[in-house]
Image (cartoon, grey):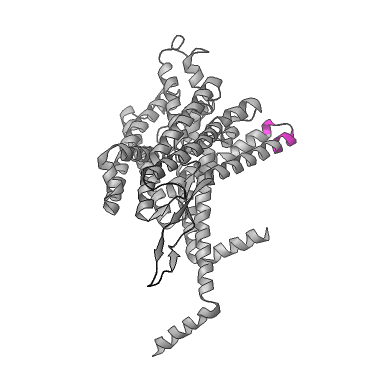
């Protein structure tokens, strides 16, 4: 505890770091305030009861990622997700389309600016599509729209407001990245997820009559979080050596710098992307089937494909979900990790993997190692993706809290918190380094500068 207090004091003593943290908190506060500003002409109570009645559906999950803004019908109802979707699309195009490959790899800063501009325009287009769907859902919800508001004005005004809200959230994220601490867009998603956590805890406390069982649930959540941190941070180190070089006129051979180096290959190189892709794909069958498997135009028939794939806690849903996550993990890792590039880089640096020939043999070795470590990483991602359903079914934990035991929410929370802590730690290390420079034998350096200044 004393060490924690000391660390907080050190953080607060660095003016730049303190300013960045305060700026980040202010931007996040603005984002949270905007999630409670209701769209004009919308009856929030009717929409809230409709979404709350189906927490295990797509709407419930979207509401969790928006921090309740979706349920509140606020100006940030779409949140930052359209920008995330646009970024994913551009990233995938970078693997397949030569034009985007050239922008990402060869054109440097100008290429990145073009990609940013294209991503923003695509974000607006996605906002128009998702905003139309969102307003259609509101229109189909009984008593959700004020009857005195003209239909045309309702659509026009709210489409503009929803698009402006997402663009403003995107701007907040960019400002946090530039002037705050951490990745701004990731922090906006994280703060939305965290905003639903207190209500989930309260709901589980009121549900559990045995306090000891609630403590067991908290301990299990802590253990799952620790396991997720280990997997996110886990790497397989492939050792490399640099060829020796001759120094001077003699025969003295000195190893090049970084002789005992390694290539870090992450166990979970794909990150959260396989779960996002699999989750997006899992919503399609239920949506399509709902148009064909229904009884008299009402709710989908029990046992039909629609009811199975609309229930994220059902057995068939989670079996297919698990398999999709494993497959997408291999696919996305293959797109991210290029063994041929590693082999060419080692050859240019006059380095090699001990016991492996340069060139194709090196690329094959790295590919084999990546394939082997991807297997446990993909299985872990699959288990994490279906763990909320297991916790909900087996231990009868409230689904709003069970969602924090795995899936996209847990991986995003762990990754963003670790990244933010690493940035804060880097500021602390730089501050400590400055202190070392100003002490010890290097104090004479400041005296010499002073003498020079006075001359």
17, 111: nearer the viewer: 111
The correct choice, above or below, for 257 with respect to 337 in the image is below
In front of the other: 122 or 24: 122
In reply to whether residue 331 is colored magenta, the answer given is: no
Q: What residue range appears in magenta? A: 206-215
Give the side of residue 229 with respect to residue 142, left or right.
Answer: right
Residue 450 at x, y = what percent?
44, 85
Q: Main secondary structure of the magenta part?
A: helix
Count all numbered tags in the image, as a single digit: 0
Image quarter of the N terminus = bottom right
How far from the left and from the top, in percent, is residue 124?
A: 32, 39
Split into 4 quadrants, where in the image is the C terminus? bottom left
> Is there any visible trace of residue 202 in the rendered image?
yes
Q: Give me the residue at 35% from left, 49% from top.
A: 344
Farthest bottom residue in view: 455
Residue 187 visible to the viewer: no
Residue 233 place in picture, x, y as percent: 53, 47
> Would you identify the image quadrant in which residue 404 lies?
top right
Q: Is residue 209 magenta?
A: yes
Query: Camera-side residue: 246 or 25?
Result: 246
Question: In the picture shown, does residue 161 fall above or below 295?
Answer: below
């Amino acid at each position: 505890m004393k060490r924690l207090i000391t660390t907080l004091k050190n953080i607060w003593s660095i003016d730049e770091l303190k300013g960045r943290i305060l700026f980040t908190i202010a931007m996040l506060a603005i984002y949270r305030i905007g999630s409670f500003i209701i769209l004009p002409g919308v009856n929030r109570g009717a929409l809230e009861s409709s979404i709350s009645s189906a927490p295990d559906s797509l709407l419930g999950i979207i509401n969790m990622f928006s921090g309740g803004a979706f349920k509140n019908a606020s100006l940030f109802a779409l949140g930052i997700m359209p920008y995330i979707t646009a970024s994913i699309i551009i990233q995938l195009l970078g693997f397949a389309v030569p034009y985007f490959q050239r922008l990402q790899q060869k054109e440097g800063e100008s290429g990145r600016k073009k990609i940013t501009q294209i991503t923003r325009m695509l974000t607006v287009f996605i906002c128009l599509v998702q905003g139309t769907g969102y307003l259609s859902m509101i229109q189909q919800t009984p008593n959700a729209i004020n009857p005195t508001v003209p239909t045309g004005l309702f659509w026009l005004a709210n489409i503009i407001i929803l698009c402006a809200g997402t663009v403003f959230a995107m701007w907040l994220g960019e400002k946090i990245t530039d002037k705050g601490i951490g990745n701004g867009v990731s922090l906006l998603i994280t703060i939305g997820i965290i905003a639903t956590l207190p209500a989930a805890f309260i709901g589980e406390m009121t549900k559990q009559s045995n306090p000891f069982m609630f403590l067991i649930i908290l301990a299990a959540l802590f253990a799952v979080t620790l396991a997720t941190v280990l997997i996110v941070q886990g790497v397989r180190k492939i050792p490399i050596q640099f060829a020796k070089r001759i120094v001077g006129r003699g025969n003295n051979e000195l190893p090049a710098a970084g002789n005992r180096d390694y290539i870090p290959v992450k166990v979970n190189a794909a990150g959260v992307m396989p779960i996002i892709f699999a989750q997006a794909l899992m919503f399609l069958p239920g949506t399509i089937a709902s148009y064909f498997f229904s009884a008299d135009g009402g709710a989908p028939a029990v046992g039909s494909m629609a009811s199975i794939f609309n229930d994220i806690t059902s057995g068939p849903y989670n079996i297919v979900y698990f398999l999709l996550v494993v497959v997408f993990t291999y696919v996305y890792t293959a797109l991210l990790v290029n063994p041929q590039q590693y082999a060419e880089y080692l050859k240019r640096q006059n380095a090699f993997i001990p016991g492996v020939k340069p060139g194709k043999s090196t690329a094959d070795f790295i590919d084999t190692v990546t394939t082997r470590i991807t297997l446990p990483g993909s299985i872990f991602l699959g288990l994490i993706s279906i763990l909320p359903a297991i916790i909900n079914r087996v231990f009868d934990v409230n689904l709003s809290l069970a969602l924090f035991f795995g899936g996209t929410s847990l991986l995003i929370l762990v990754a963003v918190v670790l990244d933010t802590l690493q940035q804060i730690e880097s500021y602390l290390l730089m501050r400590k380094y400055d202190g070392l420079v100003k002490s010890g034998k290097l104090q004479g350096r400041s005296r010499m500068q002073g003498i020079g200044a006075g001359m």
